[in-house]
Image (cartoon, rainbow, N blue to C red):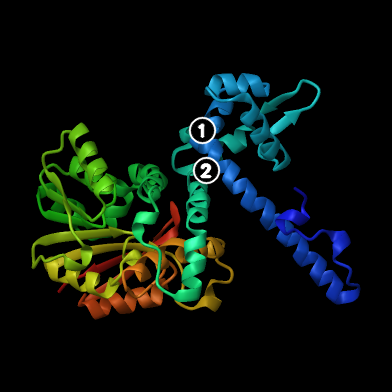
Amino acid sequence: MTAGDIGVVTENQVGVSGEVGGKRKAFTDRLLEWSNGGALSLMISIGHRTGLFDTMASLPSATSQEIADNAGLDERYVREWLGAMTTGRVVAHDPKSGTFALPAEHAACLTRASGQANSAVGFQLASMFGRVEDQVVDCFRRGGGVPYAEFPRFQAICAEISWASLDANLVEVVLPLVPGLTERLRTGCDMADVGCGSGHAVNLMAEAFPASRFVGFDWEDDALVAAQAEADRKQLGNVRFEKRDAAAFGETERYDFVTTFDAIHDQARPDVVLRAIAGALRPGGAYLCVEIRSSSTLADNLDLPWAPGMYTASCMHCMTVSLAYGGLGLGAMWGEQLTRQMLSDAGFSTVEMKALAHDPFNNYYIAMKA
């Protein structure tokens, strides 16, 4: 396989002179960079899933055989992976000794020990999106969407991405955004997490505030099993989990506090879900809606560093899942303006947005019910 086989045009193939040629050359250089980046995304995902980054961080400079032995993996695969990591400047290589090392500054971004700074976790999304590419291409031609069942690792990946940040920030940083909430949780109130996934957020809150009562709603069986298993391990008696469609919430003035964590934009009918959440809150109740930080206007997102990745994630999952169920296809990049409008339309009396330093990717909307 050559560079041409994977669709990369090299400098010698450009063949156009002058200003146009210079611009074309610059663009082909970017295409090669993106091609290599896409390939390295898969290799970083594999490095995370196999524990290779964690193993290398624990070793001095080592040969491919030593790395493979310590990781419990096949040496030939490890050697080829090291080739990608070395030429991608992720791993340092000493050709004289034939050894490899993961620089400390790279390990701080790629290992499980780095907690919420571990960027390798998110690279798992690349292979998940690739798994449904044929189906998404078909949707481009016929419309509709790819159903949730076609993303078997979605909940597990999202849980792994968010857990470290939730552990470090949810109780001490995020919840205090809502005025008076921490004290209400301490003295005892009713709380629901809609689209709870594997339930880690609601379990953290239930553990921190034993006087309050918590419930997590989701429609994915495996996620609910994982949520209940964690609650059982923590011996939490003040939390329960129910399988329920968020659009059929069916509660009236039942809760003092409701949360959603990057869950609204995936819904088939986010407008219906938001109205249901508003109806489920008692007067004076609060809703914390965490959603991707962006503008509702495309032109305003041109300089947003994560915009290409989020529009891709939206096309390959968030939007298409919604459309698969006849939904609005809101997409992950619905943005601040539309979020505020839909919260207001749902019946919330005030909406305030806050940004947090530890989480540059999300906005935190605090919506109050009169």
Name the residue at the right extreme: 17
| Residue 50 marker | 1
Please say if 126 is above or below 15.
above
Please say if 267 is above or below 86.
below
Q: Quadrant of the C terminus?
A: bottom left
Query: Mark 2 packing: few (<14 Cα in 10 Å), some, or many (20+)?
Result: many
Q: CA distance from mark 1 to mark 2?
A: 12 Å
Q: Position of residue 52 (x, y in %)?
A: 55, 31
| Residue 120 marker | 2
Q: Upstream in the sequence, badge 1 or badge 2? A: 1
Amino acid type, callout 2: Ala
Residue under the image location 90 percent in, 75 percent down: 18
Task: Locate residue 160 relative to residue 240 in the image: left or right.
Answer: right
Residue under the image location 77 percent in, 63 percent down: 28
Q: Which one is in front, 63 or 183?
A: 63
Q: Which one is in front, 287 or 200?
A: 200
Q: Are marks 1 and 2 in contact (CB under 8 Å)?
A: no
Q: Position of residue 278 (x, y in %)?
A: 18, 70
Residue under the image location 67 percent in, 57 percent down: 34
Q: Position of residue 321 (x, y in %)?
A: 37, 64
Marks 1, 2: nearer the viewer: 1
Query: Total number of numbered labels?
Result: 2
Question: Is residue 199 something one can see in this rendering?
Answer: no
Question: Is residue 17 something one can see in this rendering?
Answer: yes
Query: Mark 1 packing: few (<14 Cα in 10 Å), some, or many (20+)?
Result: some
Give the secondary structure at mark 2: helix
